[in-house]
Image: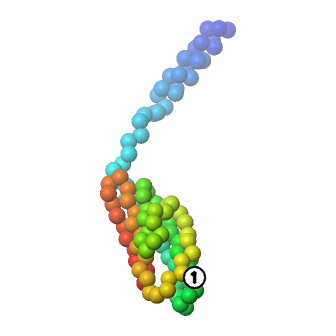
Amino acid sequence: MKKLIAICIMFIFIVIGLSGCNDIKKDENIQVSISTFKVEPAIIESGNSTILSWVVINAQTIFIDNGIGNVSSIGEISIKPSETTTYTIKAKNNSETFCSIQFY
């Protein structure tokens, strides 16, 4: 019985060892993707607010200008521009890739 248990344990270790548990290497060529960057409603009257929202994939840092700053990969914020304003989102990953989208 002990011999059978020892053989089963050894078999488990062999299966685990052969299962391909190797170090995962980072792919330096992974592209940043800004899948969503929008305002809703897109047109507002002066003094009203709108929602700026975004979804960014494969980025380590994400920054939106005009006083918003660093943000997470998925989010939204209420903005109240007093005039036509450009908002730019910049996303950066390991390979120093930047993406920008602007709204007016």
Is 101 situated left or right of 49 in this image? left
Image quadrant containing the C terminus: bottom left
Q: Where in the figure is residue 90, as x and y percent of width and height? A: 39, 66
Report the residue at 55% width, 17% height from top. Answer: 10
Q: Nearer the viewer, residue 5 or 34?
A: 34
Looking at the picture, which amino acid does disc 1 mark? Answer: Ser
Q: Where in the figure is residue 93, as x and y percent of width and height? A: 38, 56
Report the residue at 47% width, 28% height from top. Answer: 18
The residue under label 1 is 49
Q: Which image quadrant is residue 44 in?
A: bottom right
Residue 34 visible: no
Report the residue at 32% width, 57% height from top. Answer: 96
Q: Residue furthest bottom?
A: 45
Q: Which image quadrant is residue 99 in?
A: bottom left
Q: Residue furthest right?
A: 1
Residue 57 visible: yes
Q: Where in the figure is residue 94, as x and y percent of width and height? A: 35, 52
Count residues near mark 1 (Cα–Cα under 10 Å), then give few for <14, some for 14-19, many for 20+: some
Q: Where in the figure is residue 97, as x and y percent of width and height? A: 33, 60
Considering only vertical position in the picture, is 43 above or below 102?
below
Report the residue at 42% width, 58% height from top. Answer: 61
Image quadrant containing the N terminus: top right
Q: Which image quadrant is residue 50 in?
A: bottom right
Is 99 situated left or right of 7 in this image? left
Q: Nearer the viewer, residue 69 or 28?
A: 69
Considering only vertical position in the picture, is 95 above or below 76?
above
Q: Nearer the viewer, residue 68 or 89?
A: 68
Mark 1 secondary-structure assignment: loop
Q: Nearer the viewer, residue 78 or 23?
A: 78
Considering only vertical position in the picture, is 91 above or below 21?
below
